[in-house]
Amino acid sequence: MIDFSLIETLRWQPGEGFIRLRLHLARLSRSARRLGFPPPIEAEAKLETAVAGAAGPRRIRLTFNAQGHIEVTSAAFVPLGQDTVWTVRIAKTRLDSSDRLLRVKTTRRAIYESARGEYTAAEADEVILLNEHGDVCEGTITSIFLDDGTGILRTPPISCGLLAGVLRTELICRRQARVGRITLADLEAGTLYIGNSLRGLIRANLVRS
């Protein structure tokens, strides 16, 4: 029995609508198909209903379960400033690259919550997880991007055990990012960015404790 739901977290902006909506809906449909869920045909209509009459930026969370039930919640959202820099640290918690569910965004988040719990909010804005081989994978809520001086950001391959983030997909499609393995040594030698579709790309400062 499947005891989790699929998740999509979107940003809605006045005058723009949903940011990267097509990529979010495509990922939701792809994930549903892979897991044997019914097609999420009502997803877009439910999202539009959730923002009817909204006046400011919103954080929208959609969940979709194996029975085809969609639930959408909406909350006010304050975008990050362009000069924002997040402090990030490395988790002791490790991801298993053979776990294919890591490639799908679901409510099964115990491993990410465990990693996040290793540091207080004052110690780290985000925590990066490695896999069993020591490869850099992803943050608890973000994808990883490294400026290694080539002019194109490098982001870890899905095969390392990570989510196909929507921002990640967009940057790869625009040829602003390419797939390549990243080690801890690479992180320390390059310029680190993290990000997701809700918050965009964020400059990050890695602190090794």
Image: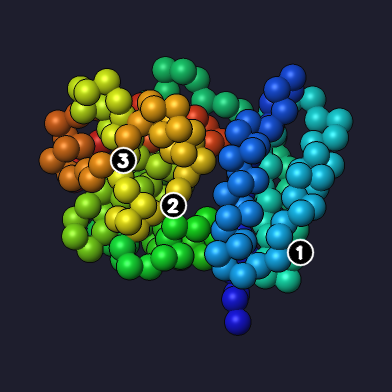
Quarter of the image with the C terminus is top left
Three-letter amino acid code at the position of disc 2: Leu
Whether residue 60 sits left or right of residue 122 in the image: it is right
Q: What's the residue at 44%, 57% (across, down)?
A: 103
Query: For this view, does 28 lie left or right of residue 207?
Result: right
Q: CA distance from mark 3 to mark 1?
A: 34 Å
Element carrying mark 3:
strand
Tell whether label 1 touches label 3 (CB within 8 Å). Answer: no
Q: Position of residue 201 (x, y in %)?
A: 44, 29
In depth, the one of 127 and 157 nearer the eye is 157
Q: Is residue 163 placed above or below 93 in the rendered structure? A: above
Circle 3 is placed at which residue position? 179
Residue at image position (27%, 20%) is 151
Which residue is denoted by mark 1 in the rendering?
69
Measured in 3D between alpha carbons, the distance from the residue under mark 3 to the one under mark 2, in whole angstroms, is 13 Å
Residue 179: x and y, percent? 31, 40
Q: Which disc is residue 163 wearing?
A: 2
Q: Nearer the viewer, residue 30 or 88?
A: 30
Mark sitting on residue 137: none
Task: Identify the residue at image location x=32%, y=48%.
Answer: 157
Mark nearer the viewer, 3 or 2: 3
Q: Secondary structure at mark 2?
A: loop
